[in-house]
């Protein structure tokens, strides 16, 4: 538990501070995002089946990254994968002098009955260890993890939903070009950081990318398949076929557990497919099933570059090149996207400046005579006042002794 904090008070203490009508929800906080308002410690009975994981694999997770499940309150279900569910939640901490801090979070709970305990533990541990070492503006912020009663990973809550849902909501219209490139730049920056620290994501796709509340920036999420890069063989066909690099595919039957040789350039290929989606707002390899997608990619078939903005086609072709060594590094991709975004912004600024000058020029010409007219009026008014005061000034001067 982080320094400066203390464990939440007991259920009896907390309940005594809450009105009777709210005791049915959470013992520490009236969580109203769903009709259940479950504490992460109070999961449904059908979800508790198989929750007692075997102890054949001991965790090597530091206590510094663990949080108490009683401090996590669950809300509505916002996502579900093959082996986990994701909920909105609240992280409730009791600080010194009983001051309570409440933070909206996202809670990923692993479903033990769907995979073997050993396999799940390894995947959970790898994800926690990776996330706990990562801190970057374009990567979802890790808060903590729980081991009991369920394997849980707690991260910041991204209220802008997934990039996949954002694009769906805009189809069939393409996204704004500057926004598309800005999203791609966010993704490239996050991946540049990961690759620089020897981490491969291996599952880059829009559903694993989350938007900020204002839906202006993207953060990478779901590191279930991420791993530290090695110079040896790694699991083949890791990821999702539609975005998977061809070198991960297996063209021949493999033995159980057999691995393939590849490196971080698989993420560059996946990024290219995502970038193409951002530019077109279309599904890559639409209408093809997984086997057909794998075959097409292995035969060097790629999405169409027709009707794309100038300057991006060559970048896409380089990123999804069949030869991984020919693909650029993310630091090079980041520089290219920054230049492209700057050129778009400068073009807009130049257009805006021209528009302003065209609007202002006639106004200056138009305002100039108005200023002269105003000046004449003021002068005329001043003369009229002086004429009115002249008789009084004469009487006043006559009264002054000579």
Image (cartoon, rainbow, N blue to C red):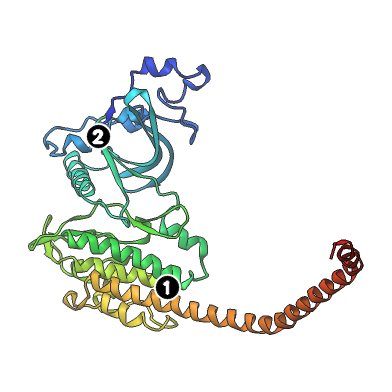
Q: Which structural element holds mark 1?
A: helix
Question: Residue 136: where, in percent of width, then height?
Answer: 28, 55
Q: Nearer the viewer, residue 209 or 183?
A: 183
Question: Residue 52: where, in percent of width, then height?
Answer: 22, 29
Which quadrant: the C terminus?
A: bottom right
Question: Residue 19: where, in percent of width, then height?
Answer: 50, 18
Q: Earlier in the sequence, mark 1 or mark 2?
A: 2
Q: Are marks 1 and 2 in contact (CB under 8 Å)?
A: no
| Number of marks in picture | 2
Q: Which mark is residue 2?
A: 2
Does 18 appear above or below 334? above
Residue sitting at x 76%, y 77%:
375
- Picture quadrant where residue 273 is located: bottom left
Residue 364 seen by the camera: yes
Q: Which residue is mark 1?
A: 279
Q: Which mark is residue 115?
A: none
- In screen coordinates, is 21 left or right of 287? right
Which quadrant: the N terminus?
A: top left
Q: CA distance from mark 1 to mark 2?
A: 43 Å
- In screen coordinates, is 369 left or right of 228? right
Residue sitting at x 38%, y 41%:
105
Q: Mark 1 against mark 2, which lies toward the viewer?
A: 2
- In screen coordinates, is 33 left or right of 387? left
Q: Nearer the viewer, residue 81 or 104?
A: 104
- Picture quadrant where residue 212 is located: bottom left
Question: Residue 284: where, in percent of width, then height?
Answer: 38, 70
Q: Which structural element holds mark 2?
A: loop
Residue 292 seen by the camera: no
């Amino acid at each position: 538990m982080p320094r400066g904090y203390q464990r939440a008070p007991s259920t009896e203490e907390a309940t005594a501070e809450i009105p009777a009508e709210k005791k049915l929800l959470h013992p520490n906080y009236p969580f109203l995002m769903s009709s259940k308002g479950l504490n992460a410690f109070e999961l449904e009975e059908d979800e508790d089946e198989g929750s007692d994981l075997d102890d054949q694999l001991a965790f090597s997770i530091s206590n510094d990254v663990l949080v108490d499940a009683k401090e996590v309150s669950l809300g509505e279900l916002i996502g579900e994968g093959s082996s986990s569910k994701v909920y909105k939640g609240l992280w409730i901490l009791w600080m010194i002098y009983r001051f309570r801090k409440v933070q909206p979070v996202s809670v990923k709970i692993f479903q033990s009955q769907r995979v073997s305990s050993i396999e799940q533990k390894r995947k959970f541990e790898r994800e926690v260890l990776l996330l706990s070492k990562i801190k970057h503006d374009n990567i979802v912020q890790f808060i903590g993890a729980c081991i009991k009663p369920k394997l849980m990973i707690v991260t910041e809550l991204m209220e802008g939903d997934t990039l996949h849902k954002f694009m769906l909501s805009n189809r069939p219209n393409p996204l704004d070009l500057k926004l598309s490139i800005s999203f791609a730049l966010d993704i490239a920056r996050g991946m540049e950081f990961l690759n620089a620290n020897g981490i491969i994501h291996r599952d880059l796709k829009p559903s694993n990318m989350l938007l900020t509340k204002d839906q202006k920036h993207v953060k990478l999420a779901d590191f279930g398949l991420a791993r530290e890069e090695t110079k040896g063989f790694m699991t083949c066909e890791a990821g999702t076929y539609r975005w998977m690099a061809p070198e991960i595919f297996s063209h021949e039957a493999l033995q159980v557990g057999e691995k393939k040789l590849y490196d971080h350039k698989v993420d560059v290929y996946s990024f290219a497919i995502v970038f193409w989606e951002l530019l077109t707002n279309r599904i890559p390899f639409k209408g093809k099933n997984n086997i057909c997608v794998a075959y097409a990619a292995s035969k060097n078939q790629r999405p169409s570059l027709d009707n794309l903005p100038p300057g991006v086609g060559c970048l896409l072709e380089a990123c999804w090149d069949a030869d991984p060594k020919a693909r650029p590094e993310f630091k090079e991709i980041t520089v290219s996207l920054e230049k492209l975004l700057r050129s778009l912004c400068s073009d807009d600024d130049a257009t805006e400046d021209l528009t302003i000058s065209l609007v202002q020029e006639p106004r200056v010409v138009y305002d100039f005579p108005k200023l002269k007219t105003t000046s004449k009026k003021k002068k005329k008014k001043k003369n009229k006042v002086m004429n009115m005061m002249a008789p009084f000034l004469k009487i006043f001067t006559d009264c002054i002794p000579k």
